[in-house]
Image (cartoon, coloured by chain):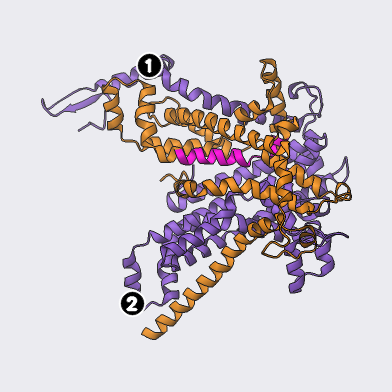
Amino acid sequence: MRDKGSDYLIFDQASGTYREDPEQLVRDDVEKHYWLHVGRTILKDWRLYVMLLPTLLVFLFWRYLPMYELLGAFKVSDQVKPVADQYFAGFSYFKTLLVGGGTGGLSVEFWRALRNTFLLSFYGLCFGFPMPIILALFFNEIRSNIARSFYQVLTYLPKFMSTVVMTSLVMMLVKQGSLTSGAGIVSQFLARLGLISQETANAGLLNNPNFFRGIYQISGIWETAGYDSIVFFAAIIAISPTSYEAAQIDGAGKMAQMRYVVLPSILSTIVIMLIMRIGSLLNIGYEKVLLLYNTNTYVTADVVSTFAQRYGLAGAQKGIASAAEMMNNVVGMLLVIGANTVARKASNVSLY
Amino acid sequence: MKRKLEVSELIFKILSYTLLTVFALGCLYPFLYAVSASISGRHAVDYGEVVLFPKDIQFDAFRRMFNDNMFWNSYSNTLFLTVYGTLWALGVAILGAYALSKKRLLFRKFFNFYLVFTMWFAAGIVPQYLNYLATKQVFNSVGITDDKWLVVIAMGMAAMNIILLRNAFENVPSEIEEAAIVDGATEFGVLSKVFIPMSKSTIATVALFFAISRWNGYFWARQMISNAHEHPLQVFIRLTLEDFTNSETMAGWNEAYASDSVIYALIVCSIVPILIIYPFIQKYFAKGTNAGGVKE
């Protein structure tokens, strides 16, 4: 029974009078000698802080110090001098990338890369995102545990390949033909079905910019759809059987059950996953693109990270590359934070 | 009414079995093809006669791989990076997560933000590369000239994994911790005797995540390890592929098996060990996705 009017007085039930609150005195003391208090607490629990130290150092060295190198985006690139000693270049790289000027086509290439980054993610959202949900619905239809595990194991399998192995397989399956050998087996199959011409198949599908996005999405679905369905399947099997029974008694058919029982129950999972996916629209995995693209497919395949990799690591324009990635990552960060805020508002669940 | 119900149910059941079978076979086919193509004869592979089953069986492509010292070298390098990298990352992550799970830790909010911010914003490839060059100089100056150790220490730490561990540690009942302290356990004793045994399955999951990312790591291993004898398997596969799909170097190919068979053999060799341990790790993998670090 605290008297709301005073922080210092506390109602003592035993004696029926007010007395001073000893805790408030401690709080006062902490406020007065804040840093002394901090030092004392750290000394008392010094083992905890020692345990935390390696983590802090690893993140400092390999996550935060690279951010310091981002300063290079505002400096004249120099192969020898460290970034602190380089001459200041202002926003010239950003200007070159955004509005052009200087070295001609860079701006065009940057906007193309930005557009490709967005489109590859966006198509992933349209085609790659629903697949795991559909798979989970189908898994739910299979009553026999053995059969279901069989299907699940087969569909999870591609997730365990590394990006290198996955892209190597894709490259071999749609490779170009030559004088001494035919095109990849999948290209041949598509040509025989009449979906693509024999010449297109022989030229190699990965050399054709029209096919890059398709190959990227299909290989993405192949790799992750099964594994991503775990989350949705877990949400579906958590639905109580009584919900189905109630719906059946009300005369709901299979489709009606799907519409009024299953979908509402997994809706929150879907929303969270969707929001998170939107949040990472610009954080595209560069490794896969880097391994799949080539000079012929820059038009549709070049994303900001590979653009930066090409100019900054393979070439020597570190300033331009840093500026490009910085813009991409800042916008990406805003998207992630926005998505997380929306998720928290929408369902009280947030990832961080 | 009753009949209509059954029909729609039946149709949906047939539909799901059919589509699932198609999808599952589609997932499996590239692997089956890789196996068949790696052991088929040259003409059969080059002219697309291998569709599902091997033809004119030969094992020379595998023999060539197994006789290649660089192949075994890359395998042992991958094992090195995976084992030491996982141990290092897991050790750091467990200690850090334990400290972060304690409510009495001062500036706890700040430390959490310090980790989470790296999930929101990454400096990017080029600044990271410049930073690795700088840290490499520091490493070299203290006598560590082996690129592999820099890769082990510098790479593969993930904030998400630390947060997963932290959440698991937070769920350990405080009564058990207090009991251990009353019994005279030190901070480290509490961690090793109470917290680690009680969150074994999360630790296994996180260890698996670390190990997978190490086993699959390609880009930074290729950028940072200059000596070809220290390249891990993934880099070796990619370099072989680049070499073998270059039409100039392949012009003089006159083995009895196709050059493609070598690449397929390599792909098969890199997948087989994962297939062998797959049944044992599958449940931890599924658990990891469900935990997902979601906090209410």
Residue A186 vs residue A89, the one in the foreground: A186
Q: What residue did someone put label 2 on?
A: A250
- Residue at left offset 41%, top offset 26%: B105
Chain B color in figure: orange
Specify the subunit that label 1 lies on: A
Task: Please state the horizontal and vertical placement of residue B237, each as a whole percent of the image.
Answer: 71, 44
What chain is colored purple? A
Q: Are marks 1 and 2 on the same chain?
A: yes
Task: Please state the horizontal and vertical placement of residue A181, each as a whole percent of the image.
Answer: 83, 60
- Residue at left offset 57%, top offset 42%: B212
Q: Horizontally, is B97 left or right of A97 in the view?
A: left
Q: Which residues are magenta?
A: B204-222
Callout 1 amino acid: Lys
- Vertical position of residue A250 compared to residue B217: above or below: below
Residue B256 vs residue B136, the one in the foreground: B256
- Vertical position of residue A111 compared to residue A2: above or below: below
Task: Please state the horizontal and vertical placement of residue A118, each as a whole percent of the image.
Answer: 68, 53
Q: What residue did someone put label 1 on?
A: A44
